[in-house]
Image (spheres, grey):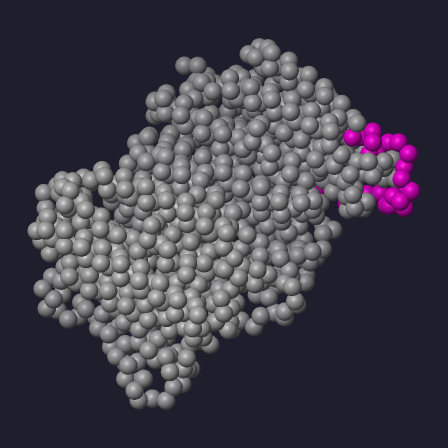
Amino acid sequence: MNWLIAAPEISYFASALWFLVLSLAAKPDARREHRTSLLLGGLGVAICTVSIGQEGYLFTRAFRVDLFSQVFKELLSLSLFLVLTLCGKMRDLRERHRHDFYVLLFVCTLAMMLLVSADHLLALFLSLELSSYSLYILVAVRRDQRFGTEAGIKYFLVGTFASAVMLFGLALLYASAPATYLSDMARAPSGMAERPLAFLGLLMTLGGLFFKLAVFPFHFWAPDTYQGAMNQVAAYIATASKVAAVAVMVRVVALAGQGSAHLVQILAVLSIMSMTVGNLAAIAQKDLKRLLAFSTTAHAGYVLIGILAVNESGYAGAVFYAMALLLMKFSAFLVVTVVAGDGKNLEVEDLAGLHRRSPILALTLMVSLFGLAGIPPTIGFTAKFLVFVAAMERGHFALVLIAMINVVVSLYYYLLVVKAAYLTEPREETGPRAVSLSTRILAGALASGMVVAGFFPTYLMELADSAVQVLLSGP
Amino acid sequence: MHLTYADFPYLSAILFSCVAGLGVILAVPDERKDLIRKAGAVFSGATLFLSVSLFVSYDRHLGGLQFVEKIAWIPSLGIHYFNGVDGFSLPNLLLTGIVFFTGVLTMWGMESRVKEFYALYFVLVTGVFGLFMSMDLFFIFVWYDVSLFPMYLLIAVWGSTRKEYGAMKLTLYLLAGSALILPTVIFLFVRSGLNTFDVVSLMQSGVFTPQDQKFAFLLLYLGFGILAGVWPFHTWSPVGHVAAPHAVSMVHAGVLMKIGAFGVLRVAVMLCPEGWKQWADLMALLAACGILYGALVGLRQTDLKYVIGYSSVSHMGVVGLGLSTVTLEGLDGAVFQMFAHGVMTALLFSSVGYIYDRTHTKMIPELGGLSRVMPVASAYFIVAAMAGMGVPGLACFWGELVVFIAAFKVYPVRGTTAVLALVVSALFMLRVVQHTFYGPPKEEYAHLPDISLVQGIPRMILLAVLLLFGLYPALLFDVIQTASVPFMVGLSR
């Protein structure tokens, strides 16, 4: 076995160990730890970038390393690094928990990296559980006992339920295939997904992933968890966790091949419900993180449109959508975290007068929200466009129309946030907000990145395309 | 369609001067308001110059699509950066240049958040220019939305009279239009099987089955029609016009509503001619309703801007009526009316802007006798109002005349109703003029200064354009016919 192809995983494992050792030995020093984490996170991004062309198998084919998994590892390392940039001031985290916080973040990223390359059912399940358990603790670790603990327990209960469903689904898949490798199942005679047992297994397996992606009806944890978790952790869940979920979902649905009409119908219903429920519920939200949580559910619906097209362009669209979501959601959370400053939750009306307090943050917020709504020329529009084209190729006109109507609904609450940032005057006069230069540069880079990637999406599209081609062509 | 490639990328230069203007405005610090305004004037002036030179140098004998620029943008989906000018888009580009520049001048006196205003205004106009010149469905949609999203902030921040309500209503209505357009555009893309968004390739006959055309046309007509103020989807328009700041009202009523009508023409009519024939009856009905409804409701308004808003609904109905005739004259008249109405409405809003900035009211009962206080400013409004009534010698006359001649032949009853409605609209315009500018002057406005020569420049430009095309309509009709004649000939074959 060539250990070099596991370089990203090894690097994240070592980073986690490093923080574990640090927690035993060194005296706590917030600044130093943050710098170390940034360094290690940056190193991880670099390693993932270098090893993007790697191919091969790990641990007797339990993990398959190919362009598909490497692209997602790159995205995951990127989202960890971005989230780490927000961790400079964590006032709502106890000092003695800080090391654990970093350990868990790195472990969780490691688990997701294993998840996106898992080919064996057991490897898939174990890495999913590892990432989930890290997240349960990360959510509950917040100093605010009331919110943090409640959110952690809720997340844990719904999560374990989803895991149980998924485990049962995996068992059924094995019973009907009978194989324990996803790539072996994909080679099973076509029409396998039409068999009731296999179909049920596939659906229940997807159920566990629906939970991760916050698809209706597995979305109930999202608003409470986002609200109760630290802003940084919520940002991590909204970006990395979703990216990983999209990857596994594409892998699992690709098993069904072009065959299963029932699966497509069910996914279409779930997609419509997710979009509609997410968008309608988001309208009523006052807490910005809850609003973003419901919008996540809506976005899960849009991603499903790409996946349920069950063709190459649909999967590629979903992968592109994951990239876009990473960028847009993180930008929104960047603004939330920086504006909240002291780690409190942020109400929409707390944004009042942001355009004067910090023009660059207001601009970044506006671009990310328009992106989330899917207004060109942002990357969010391109992503929607790609999944719509894929769905239309399969003749889902009504689905695309419903999705577009949902876009109109979603624009309403995004505009309310934009209005708060640009129009509403704060109740008490606050001076300009001191935002560090590095944050301003990051915000500016994200805003321009969203627009530039929207205007010139060709490179990212080709990357997503070739990743999906590798996935579909098999070993 | 005949394509002539450009030696010099005029069209990209127009977009570039918008984007460069945006960049310069963003780079200037907030406090240098005068510099920002000057930068705005210089760059919008450049686009005006470019669009005028485009209008002049378009080869009328050659016709077809000229100044073409085509670069593959996203090859895997057949998306091209494909710009070109034909007889339909040329008048609209000229109109946009004129309204853009005069709008910048009209807002010269504004003091609040100048930088943000001009930045958003430039984004808005970039989208409008892009849409008129683009020949690629993907880009047409992108530009459509680019021109919509700055509207919300432009109205909600700098507007007046229920501005947040007006801004939200307008944005959601127009986005609802795009919710119909995007699925239909993708539907056409998939159905063509050509893997291209290029309008010129897609408009060849036989690409779409008649059934697809009928289906797609209806959705496209409704989607773009919302933006064109087609009755009964017009309700955003008066509210939005009233709430918007003057320059935005000018662009909005003057140009943005034309985007809707232009979209119906460029996308719906040109790609789905079978659908056009099929649904022409419905279009005529809605257009006649709009003309009548706009005129009757306008009669009851007491707010100057509402009056103009409803007259826009009425006048855009004329454009719709022209399109619905499926005849050469109707098409010519509709495009002419798009141009003429744009200039006329811009002049109306620009004049109201001056009056409102001085008197701080746009309620007709509170005004009166203004022609004695500010004779020149009043004259601008009165001339524009006369243009709106269709007085010969001003540009609107020709558009309406040609459309009505065509409409009488095809739809006698609806045509007659529409003409009667125009009499009503003349009545309400005269009533507004009478109550606002004549009668006893109000004490409190007696000291107000009249419009100065410099302040009058944007209005003079608009007035001159109205007169020029009113006295010499062939200048515009010749251009339009280079596109409409080949299109209608191709259709009858």
Q: What percent of the width, then of the height, locates residue A390?
A: 31, 41
- Check the picture and name the quadrant holding the C terminus of chain B: top left
Would residue B40 be found to the left or right of residue A249 on screen? Answer: right
Does residue B318 appear in this view?
Answer: no
* Relative side of B424 to B187, left or right: right
- Residue at left 68%, top 61%? B32
A274 is higher (above) or lower (below) than B392: below
Q: Is residue B457 magenta?
A: yes
Q: Nearer the viewer, residue B243 or B357?
A: B243
Q: Can the viewer see residue B153 in this picture?
A: yes
Q: Residue at x 23, y 39 (%)?
A: A262
Q: Which residues are magenta?
A: B432-459
Residue B149 coordinates in the image, percent (x, y): 53, 46
Q: Based on the displayed image, in which of its 4 quarters is residue A65 positioned?
A: bottom left
Front one among A31 and A360: A31
Quadrant of image for the N terminus of chain B:
top left
Task: Report the side of A416 relative to B382 (left or right).
Answer: left
Vertical placement of B262 versus A304: above or below?
Answer: above
Residue at 53 percent of width and 71 percent of height: A435
Name the residue at 38% across, 86% down: A28
Is residue B183 in the magenta section?
Answer: no
Left or right: residue B125 versus residue A383 is right
Say how many tags the image has.
0
The front one of A141 and A68 is: A141
Residue A23, image x and y in percent? 32, 84
Expressed as whole percent of the image width and height from the top left, the position of residue A82 reads 39, 67
